[in-house]
Image (cartoon, grey):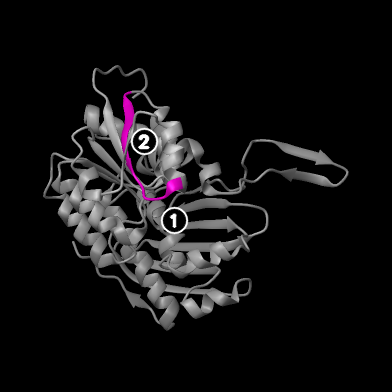
């Protein structure tokens, strides 16, 4: 809420101070009416960074102690995916608002359990973080679609393609990531739900892909390039593409086709709006990662969560039911990829 004044401060406790935890901490520290009062981590390097960055913050090693901290109003969950359920539910049980990194889980039954658990606490604000909901171009596209500018949505085509990373650490990460559809394309699945803007119901999923660049992924039931198709009861079709081997950098883009027109978001993989022309032709600068491309969106989602908690805004952009749906879709796309068959999507709510 631009220009807002407040006598209240939203005090965050952050679970994990690694890649995503540090991004959220830095954004909280640069946002009015928010503070970081506690962090839980067992990693010595992260503890040292927290001491240097937030001298007054408590550093916990016990989650039960952390979640009972009376100086924490809301928790930011940046722990590994398999710990989300425990951290999420215990936070609610201890009266904390929850801001959880995506995905809720790599298991749809757990994701829906988390969603249904959140309904028991109507006084608490509970969100799953998907940054594209807080990118101006996506927000503008959603508003145009809601206003009927392209008619009824027929198809959403979205992609998340990441810069090539040959490091052993990256391959080790893939083993436990849940698969490309759940780890990578879940951004596209949620973006599609956000842009459609209605409570639509996915029914079937078909996923396929290739392992030409990272052949080792095949042994883990995964691919380096994914292609997925999801059908909905309402007649909408969502198609997604993911890649782990972009040579030119990260490129997220989304196209929405309607009965009266089309919207293309981030069609060119620009980091900055600059073209460099020479005798060798014209080139643009792409971002290396999603965190770079959508850096402002990560701060915007913290601001939106703050305003939801402190000022009870209704247009915050978060949708936990969509977050659970995205897991269901990603899980069944991954199942289809591994079996070669069309998978049925069943929602647990």
Q: Report which quarter residue 300 is drawn in.
A: top left
Q: Is 112 on the left or on the right of 182, as rendered?
A: left
Circle 2 residues within 10 Å: few <14, some 14–19, many ≥20 = many
For the residue labelled by badge 2, is the local secondary structure a helix, a strand or a loop? helix
Chain-order first, disc 2 or disc 1: 1
Asked if residue 108 is positioned above or below residue 267 in the image, the reply reads below
Q: Quadrant of the N terminus?
A: top left
Spatial CA distance of label 2 from label 1 is 20 Å
Q: Which mark is residue 248?
A: none
For the residue labelled by badge 1, is the local secondary structure a helix, a strand or a loop? helix
- Count the marks: 2
Whether residue 35 appears in magenta in the rendering, the answer is: yes
Q: Which stretch did the figure color magenta?
A: 33-44
* Residue named by callout 1: 188
Q: Quadrant of the C terminus?
A: bottom left
Task: Please tell me which residue is depicted at 36% across the width and 17% down the height of the picture.
Answer: 3
* Residue named by callout 2: 302
């Amino acid at each position: 809420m631009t220009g807002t004044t407040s006598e209240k401060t939203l005090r965050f406790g952050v679970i994990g101070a690694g890649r995503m935890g540090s991004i959220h901490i830095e954004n909280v520290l640069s946002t009015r009416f928010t503070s970081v009062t506690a962090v839980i981590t067992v990693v010595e390097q992260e503890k040292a960074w927290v001491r240097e960055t937030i001298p007054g913050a408590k550093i916990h090693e016990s989650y039960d102690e952390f979640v009972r901290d009376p100086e924490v109003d809301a928790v930011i969950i940046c722990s590994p995916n398999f710990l989300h359920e425990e951290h999420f539910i215990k936070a609610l049980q201890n009266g904390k608002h929850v801001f959880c990194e995506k995905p809720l889980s790599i298991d749809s039954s757990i994701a829906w359990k988390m969603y249904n658990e959140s309904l028991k606490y109507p006084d608490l604000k509970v969100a799953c973080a998907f940054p594209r909901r807080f990118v101006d171009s996506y927000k503008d596209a959603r508003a145009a679609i809601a206003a009927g500018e392209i008619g009824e949505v027929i198809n959403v085509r979205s992609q998340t393609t990441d810069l090539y990373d040959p490091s052993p650490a990256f391959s080790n990460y893939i083993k436990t990531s849940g698969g490309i559809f759940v780890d990578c394309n879940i951004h596209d699945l949620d973006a599609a739900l956000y842009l459609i803007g209605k409570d639509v119901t996915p029914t079937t999923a078909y996923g396929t892909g290739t392992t030409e660049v990272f052949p080792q992924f095949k042994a883990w039931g995964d691919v380096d390039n994914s292609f997925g198709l999801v059908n909905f009861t309402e007649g909408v079709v969502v198609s997604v593409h993911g890649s782990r081997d972009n040579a030119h950098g990260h490129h997220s883009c989304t196209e929405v086709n309607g009965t009266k027109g089309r919207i293309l978001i981030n069609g060119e993989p620009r980091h900055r709006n600059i073209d460099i022309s020479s005798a060798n032709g014209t080139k643009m600068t792409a971002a290396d990662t999603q965190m770079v491309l959508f850096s402002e969106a990560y701060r915007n989602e913290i601001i939106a969560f703050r305003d939801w908690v402190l000022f009870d805004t209704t247009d915050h952009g978060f949708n936990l039911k969509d977050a659970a749906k995205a897991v269901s879709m990603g899980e069944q796309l991954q199942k289809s990829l591994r079996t070669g068959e069309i998978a049925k999507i069943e929602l647990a709510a």
